[in-house]
Amino acid sequence: MFSKVHKVAKQVNSIIIGKEQQIRQALVCLLAGGHLLIEDLPGVGKTTLAHALAISLGLKFNRLQFTSDLLPADVVGISIFDREKSQFIFHPGPIFSQVLLADEINRATPKTQSSLLEAMEERQVSVEGQTRNLPQPFFVIATQNPAHQVGTFALPESQLDRFLMCLSLGYPDAAAERALLMGEDRRSLLAQLPAVMQSDELMQAQQQLRQIHASAPLIDYVQSLANATRQGDLFAEGMSPRASIALLQAARAWAAMEGRDHVLPEDVQAVLIPVIAHRLRPLKSQTGKVSASSELLAQLMKRVSV
């Protein structure tokens, strides 16, 4: 089953050139059953990556452009009165899909952003007093522009904590950019992509992650990392229990991608930065950045012995 995941990675790599590490991390995030946040400057391929992942995994997806005038009803749906039936009929919003591509999520107001909280945590939405389940599997792949850009609303900590991983693509290197300039248009290539996996195969692979063994010393290592963020002098607040669970689940997925049936400390370290950097705030006396930097997290890994 995991061999198909590698085929998905190979196909997505043919669309997003020169970003093998980020694509692998994105697949690990979805394999672990988590939501993915891609943060970077406009035009570096965030939306294209989300499209390529959804298509290659055989998932039904909807793309929703988040803007300042977007309302919660535009996301979850609304009931409209039907005169012929003399009753209200619920019209599902774009969130009723296996993948919701929330494009430029931080351009929507906090009220609209909050409409995703229940869906991301419980895979359901409550509309007009009725709870409706979402399709399975369900993922939110969100893109956001840097907070310093005009017209953005910062995601609150409660929202950030629901994203299992946060990735940044960055600019392509010279060889990759030349291949993009000389190659076919990426959007036309997306239209030609086949589905390498089906949704039931992805869910089966997610179930197999439970068989990836995490030993007691490995659990001790994850707990030591969490405690170090809570008690040290690097971060304003420490990792939440949800973050610890996410770190272990992502490490299991990374180990499965490596072809192993057990988790090593190296697996935890491989996913540590994308899993917890967006959840932690550095102390203001050290830096004014909103999220933790890779340098701070490198210090954390040095402090916590394996």
Image (cartoon, grey):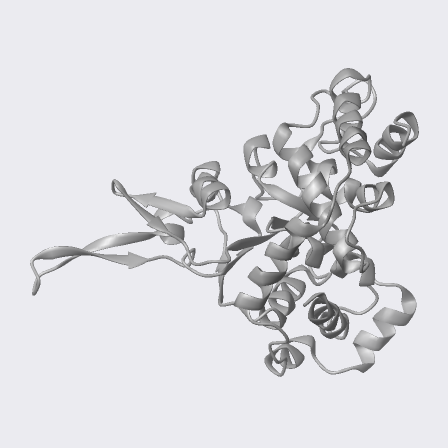
Res 115 → quadrant = top left
Q: Quadrant of the N terminus?
A: bottom right
Judging depth in this view, the residue of 92 and 204 nearest the camera is: 204
Q: How many marks?
A: 0
Judging depth in this view, the residue of 95 and 156 nearest the camera is: 95
Q: Residue at x 80, y 42 (%)?
A: 268
Judging depth in this view, the residue of 232 and 255 nearest the camera is: 255
Q: Quadrant of the C terminus?
A: top right
Q: Residue at x 86, y 74 (%)?
A: 178
Res 5 → quadrant = bottom right
> Residue 37 appears at what percent x and percent y?
64, 49
Would residue 227 be found to the left or right of residue 150 on screen?
Answer: right
> Residue 201 appears at what percent x and percent y?
58, 67
Q: Residue at x 68, y 46 (%)?
A: 165
Res 281 → quadrant = top right
Judging depth in this view, the residue of 24 and 188 nearest the camera is: 24
> Residue 65 appears at what percent x and percent y?
50, 57
Would residue 198 be found to the left or right of residue 174 on screen?
Answer: left
Picture layout, residue 5 above or below residue 296: below
Q: Is residue 48 visible?
A: yes
Q: Is residue 40 visible?
A: no
